[in-house]
Image: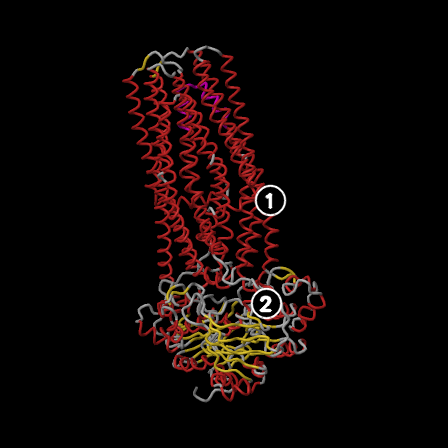
Amino acid sequence: MKRLLVYLKNYKKETVIGPLFKLLEASFELMIPLVVAAIVDTGIPGNDKGYIFKMCAIMVALGLIGMVCAITAQFFSAKAAVGFGTELRHALFAHMQTLSHSEFDKIGTSTMITRMTGDINQVQTGVNLVLRLFLRSPFIVFGAMIMAFTVDAKSALTFVVVIPLLSIVVFGVMLITMPLFKKVQGALDKVLGATRQNLTGVRVIRAFGQQEEEIKNFNEHNGMLNRLQIVTGRISGLTNPLTYIIVNAGIIVLIYCGALRVEGGIITQGAVVALVNYMSQILVELVKLANLIVTVTKAFACAHRIEAVFDMTPSICDSENTVAEEYNGEEIVSFKDVNLCYQTSSEDSLENINFSVKRGETVGIIGGTGSGKSSLINLIPRFYDVTKGSVMVAGKDVRDYKLDELRHRIGIVPQKAVLFKGTLRDNLKWGNENATDEEMLKALEVAQAKEFTDKWEEGFDKQIAQNGKNLSGGQRQRLTIARALVRNPEILILDDSASALDYLTDAKLRAAIKKISGGKLTTFIVSQRTASIMHADKIIVLDEGEMVGIGTHDELLMNCEVYKEIYESQFKKPKEGE
Amino acid sequence: MKGNKKTISRIFGYIKSQMFLVVLSLIFSLISVVLTLYVPILTGKAIDCILDNGIEWDLLKGYLYQIAASVLITALAQWLMNLINNKITYRVVRDIRRDAFAKIEELPLSYIDSHAHGDTVSRVITDADQFADGLLMGFTQLFSGIITIVGTLGFMLILNVKIALVVVCITPLSLFVASFIAKKTYDMFKLQSQIRGEQTSLIDEMIGNQKVVKAFGREDKIVERFDEINERLGKASLRAIFFSSITNPGTRFVNNLVYASVALTGALTVLATGNAAGTFTVGILTTFLSYANQYTKPFNEISGVITELQNAFACAGRIFELIFDTEAQIPDAENARVLDNPNGEIDLRNVEFSYVPEKELIKNLNLSVKPGQRIAIVGPTGCGKTTVINLLMRFYDVNKGEISVDGTDIRDITRHSLRKSYGMVLQETWLKSGTIEDNIRMGKPEATREEVINAAKASHAHGFIKRLPNGYDTVITEDGGGLSQGQKQLLCIARVMLCLPPMLILDEATSSIDTRTEIRIQKAFAKMMEGRTSFIVAHRLSTIKEADVILVMRDGNIIEQGNHEELMNKKGFYAELYSQM
């Protein structure tokens, strides 16, 4: 929580004014028992009706001023809390943007989203409550004590005993329930997981007749959640009864001591009434507080979850000593003794990879399921850092680049064709903010997308739905290719991105890419189809994370067993009986 | 509140089983409220013993003991009431969730396919949670609040009718203030949640596709867009929060008015009676003042509780809609046949089917499959291949005609035994969260570790499983976590290889597996299909050519049917498709 408080720093004024007015309001509230005491002690014995009227008028006036103060306080605390929430949201979102792929792999997308939305809302509510009440409550409690001292110091000593006891109860319950709330949240996550799983996997579950099993499994998680909730409730339910006992014990002591003091002629009956009133005021305040403590405790639990995200530092960041030097060498990409081991796995995904690529070459990457094709190309834009060895782009280690500068040289077409909500123009401009319509048209043409975008009446203003749901798979894929081309990159990476295209379109696409570059664009094509890569200048064959062959199609057919097998599996009709 | 009637009666349906606890809770609540109200009377009496001209110690001590006893009992009753309320609420919610989940298992596929999963999940999770919060608050606050109001009113009336009437007249003002503000702020809250929804969907889109964002270096641009929405959200929230928070100071001011009026009328009454014992004394005035405080407090809370309850009922309504108002699939007939190791003869007669009435899909489909035959289904995307599988597995029921297995209409066979008779591998791999072994064992829970390993070996999954951190005990997350698409598919194949049902459905079962591994698996597949009726959706030529019957589908119809040779000779759509492959 402490770490998050920096986001209040632009609201210093509000965080001071808010509670201040709250305290003012509270002080007016504290005066009311005094006024009542005055009526009892002066007005009634003196039979002075005028005085009583005056005192009651004062009470109403105090209430009115109190209300104005309270509204002022509400305004400033709301402003501070909302401002805090807004800045925290911005900071967390911006922080998430800096994290690299490894961190996202580790924590998972859905938690990130919950933390960004639900958790921040809880914390914002918590801050607002703290500003409004957590200062007010102690103030009323201590204020009541101080007022009691002005009435009669000796009797008021009761307050000195009662108040620490109350704090122990309140904070004790908070401390004990906080970890429990976190557990409840975790159990809820599990129930959610079980539910989602049964919707996404409904066909398989029913095909295998697993409904009974799944119901059992769900009931287990559900029961666990229920037990945790009840245990948590059992403890937080203690606050009210305990404070009630303590405060009333205080009242009993007050009356008894008060009686002794009245007997001694030191104080009046009215004073005893005032003392008892102050004690009851503490009770009223604490009951209010106890109901809100749950909210604040939840806010703390959520704050911890948010802090955990802030604690994650991006494993990949800009290099500090970047020098922009012209590179005129031939080699655009080279891998030297590269090993890669993901944080989530125990084994190397890539082992000892060595190769280099000249400017303008087309490189095919082929290999079996899980052989490391995607891992390999993910290293070029530095989505992950190598565990050993180095990856060079234009003569410089990728770790010596500013990330922006490095990634700006590269156009990527990811395996999953993702488009974003917005117009076609918005989507294409992802590649290059300053692209002209002409450039975009050119890119569409090369990507073989023009044939269908031309039919769109709205042209570049065509609205695309989230994830491109209003387009077919093939259309989406061609638009993602166009998006990468708009960037006018030096290196183009196609990560198995033509799989939704039929063979003919695929071939036309490759030919068009070759043509536009004027021999300068270096292209990496990852594919399972030999046909897509067989004309490449260089083909890299991967098998279980190792490079088992590199060369042209013809060379590999001669000397690479794995490549030969892949090729034959696709082009040769199987032998009889196989 | 009109639409709430049904909801409320349904909530009572769930509470019924907890009736004993509810009664207990009411009793404890009554005890604690009555005693809480009685304590100020005792306090007042005790104070009256303290007279400036001497103290009645015996009486005073007696009262103090009574106070102590009442306080202890009250606290105990309060705690027990809290415990019971917790138990009732969370049990009710647990039961609702249990029923909702059981209902999900019985929903027809058509419902699940046509409703966003996120919506159903949020009913079971978020709505249930909100309902729990509201119900708990309702139980603890609404109930004790009403008792408190009635109780204090009663006590005040006993003590002094005139002053009590003053209180009764002024208090409704606070309810008026609260409802006035609630009405005014409703639109502000609506705007707030609307902007919040906008923001959530941006977060969902951008965090979900973080890798693409990175690739194009769009981080800053997105933060800009985020900030724009965030700014608007901040403004809307401030308005909503501030204006709604005026309620409390407003109602508190009304309370102050009540308090001052009681003090005034009370003091004047004391004057009139001369503070003599047996009349309206200062002690009674003290009691009255504290009642005035206690009486007004629940009004503040109840106005809050009612909004909360409205929300809770709305949430409960959404879950109940799922549990009660959604049609479940037609249950199995009582005398339905339990299919046991069928020989695999399948007949489709005059089958008609469509997902939506206005768009017919499958018309007059006839097919007769002999035991052990291999049927390949080919055709362009969207031609209805998957629909045929949906019908065979009885995920959907035919609109007309019938499908029979071993001569029995599948509607007269229990769903469980029908589906268990098919081994199914789909293009879309699905794994449940659990260990690798759990996943393979899904169709045959009693399989030994050895059998599991053999199945994995047959599907060529053993190699990569061995290399996972914990081998077969590696826990995978719902979406398969670190496994590649191809590896997931291998696991799905191993799953079927283990239980080996008498009939098979393979829908693009090897689409994500590289061709080399695929060829190796083919052997195992070929062995598996021997003697088993199999339906295969595939794009690979060799698989299709070897089929006994090839169904060529287009726009929901089977336009050609026959073996490879026959179809090629026909020079129709199949021949055209074949030339493109």
Residue B129's label in the rendered image is: none
Determine which residue is flagged by label 1: B235
Q: In whole angstroms, how far apart are the C-alphas of marks 2 and 1?
A: 38 Å
Residue B30 on image: x %, y %: 35, 32
- Name the amino acid type tagged 1: Lys
Q: Secondary structure at mark 2?
A: helix
> Horizontal placement of B17 versus A33: left or right?
left
Determine which residue is flagged by label 2: A406
Q: Quadrant of residue A320?
A: bottom right
Q: Is residue B108 visible?
A: no
Q: Is residue B423 visible?
A: yes
Residue A264 on image: x %, y %: 33, 15
Give the label, 2 or 1, closer to the camera.
2
Residue at image point 41% right, 55% down: A191
Q: Secondary structure at mark 1?
A: helix
Q: Quadrant of the C terminus of chain A?
A: bottom left
Q: Which residues are magenta?
A: B150-171
Is residue B152 magenta-colored? Answer: yes
> Horizontal placement of A544 versus B334: left or right?
right
Residue at image point 42% right, 63% down: B477
Tell me the crowding category of disc 2: few under 14, some 14 to 19, or many 20 or more residues within 10 angstroms, Cα based. Answer: some
> Horizontal placement of A383 versus B87: left or right?
right
Residue in front for this viewpoint, B310 or B248: B248
Residue in front for this viewpoint, A369 or A371: A371
In the image, residue A152 sits, relative to residue B101, either above or below, namely above
Q: Are marks 2 and 1 on the same chain?
A: no
Task: Using the image, name the chain to which the residue with label 1 belongs.
Answer: B
Is residue B420 magenta-colored? Answer: no
Residue in front for this viewpoint, B255 or A276: A276
